């Protein structure tokens, strides 16, 4: 199969973890005799430095032409005081919008070999296996009006959370579709006791649920969900929520896996004529500039994202399963980076990537 992939290493540790994910893709292509075609592009802070834009037109063209896009991370401290349109994160929002990837899938699994890596007690974490489905192209991150109006003591900032019925319906269907292949339970997260936006969200989710009578649906307010993720994470199977709530909750869920460096993600859009989904794949973690260039970053989130790409954008189930199995084997071996608190000396980013390739 021809695998035409755009690689956007981005900023900070993005270059290091993406290199290991690419190494794993090369190993997969070699073993299963696929033709791997890789193109590199710019996104985020490095794109601002080189082109003046966090999402250059050339990157937009490359992303539209690729079968799938692999992203490292974006963000650099030097841009913290920059206006929104000149921040690296603007590039991330822009490429999501350009590709139309409206559902962000974030699996969270507590591996038995890594229970001690979590700051939570083992009996709370053990058995956790959920996927957070976050709406990705609507909500407060994209709504208008937005901005800051300067007026001395009356200076005012405005952001708008807005959703249409269609936006809620399509991401809800994705969640129910995924639940059918899992434990058949969807938990919808909202703040419907105070937000009209959430009231529409809940109403539409209930309507969609009628088309999936084999899937159980329950609802939870976002503040209670944040608490239950820590107190009883095993209650969750598929967690469905809007953009900002999903952004926050999925990072919180990282403590269940032991490290935010463990979490992959797949951002999915509409199906292509071939049946594969348009996809943008990236680890959940940020650019971590404090450890960039030191060969310390955990590449497993990026490698897991490459595995998700094989599954969703190329339909390669066996290859994706091999990546997942290799990650689990490496975790059991103890050859892990410092964030997972290994018993012995921590492995480097490159050593972990090499170990995953050897396990495939």
Image: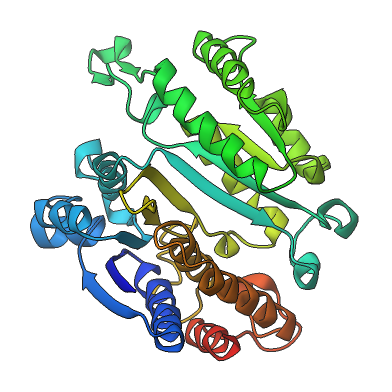
Residue 116 is drawn in which quadrant?
bottom right
What residue is rendered at 24% in x and 57% in y? 43
Q: Is residue 163 visible?
A: no
Give the colour scheme of this rendering.
Answer: rainbow
Whether residue 263 sits left or right of residue 226 in the image: it is left
Q: How many marks?
A: 0
x, y (%) of residue 291?
A: 45, 72
Q: Is residue 67 visible?
A: yes
Residue lying farthest to the front in this orientation = 274
Q: Is residue 79 above or below residue 66?
A: above
What residue is rendered at 67% in x and 89% in y? 345
Q: Is residue 356 above or below residue 156?
A: below
x, y (%) of residue 91?
A: 25, 47
Q: Quadrant of the C terminus?
A: bottom right
Residue lying farthest to the right in this orientation = 123
x, y (%) of residue 311?
A: 49, 62
x, y (%) of residue 122?
A: 86, 59
Residue 20 is drawn in which quadrant?
bottom left
Q: Is residue 166 above or below residue 295?
A: above
Whether residue 139 sits left or right of residue 325 in the image: it is left
Q: Nearer the viewer, residue 134 or 87?
A: 134
Q: Nearer the viewer, residue 321 or 112?
A: 321
What residue is rendered at 77% in x and 36% in y? 228
Q: Quadrant of the N terminus?
A: bottom left
Whether residue 201 sits left or right of residue 281 in the image: it is right
Q: Nearer the viewer, residue 121 or 322?
A: 322
Whether residue 302 sits left or right of residue 261 in the image: it is left
């Amino acid at each position: 199969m021809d695998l035409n992939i755009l690689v956007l290493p981005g900023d900070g540790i993005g270059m290091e973890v993406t290199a290991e994910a690419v190494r794993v893709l090369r190993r997969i292509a070699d073993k299963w005799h696929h033709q791997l075609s890789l193109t590199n592009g710019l996104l985020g802070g490095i794109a601002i430095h080189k082109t003046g834009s966090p999402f250059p037109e050339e990157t937009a063209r490359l992303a539209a032409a690729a079968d799938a896009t692999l992203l490292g991370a974006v963000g650099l401290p030097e841009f913290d005081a920059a206006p929104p349109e000149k921040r690296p994160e603007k590039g991330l929002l822009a490429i999501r919008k350009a590709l139309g990837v409206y559902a962000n899938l974030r699996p969270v699994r507590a591996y038995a070999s890594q229970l001690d890596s979590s700051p939570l007690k083992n009996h709370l974490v053990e058995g956790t296996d959920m996927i957070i489905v976050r709406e990705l192209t609507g909500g407060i991150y994209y709504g208008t009006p937005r901005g800051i109006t300067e007026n001395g003591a009356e200076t005012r900032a405005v952001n708008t959370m807005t959703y249409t019925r269609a936006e809620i319906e399509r991401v809800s269907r994705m969640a129910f579709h995924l639940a059918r292949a899992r434990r058949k339970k969807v938990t919808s997260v909202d703040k419907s006791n105070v937000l009209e936006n959430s009231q529409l969200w809940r109403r539409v989710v209930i309507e969609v649920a009628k088309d999936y009578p084999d899937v159980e649906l329950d609802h939870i307010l976002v503040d209670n969900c944040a608490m239950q993720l820590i107190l009883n994470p095993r209650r969750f199977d598929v967690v469905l929520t809007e953009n900002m709530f999903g952004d926050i909750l999925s990072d919180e869920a990282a403590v269940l896996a032991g490290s935010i460096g463990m979490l992959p993600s797949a951002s999915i859009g509409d199906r292509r004529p071939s049946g594969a989904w348009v996809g943008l794949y990236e680890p959940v973690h940020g650019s971590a500039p404090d450890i960039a260039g030191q060969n310390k970053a955990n590449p497993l989130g990026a490698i897991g994202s490459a595995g998700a790409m094989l599954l969703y954008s190329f339909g390669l189930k066996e290859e994706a399963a091999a990546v997942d199995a290799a990650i689990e084997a490496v975790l059991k071996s103890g050859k892990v980076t410092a964030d997972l608190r290994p018993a012995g000396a921590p492995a480097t980013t490159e050593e972990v990537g090499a170990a995953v390739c050897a396990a495939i």
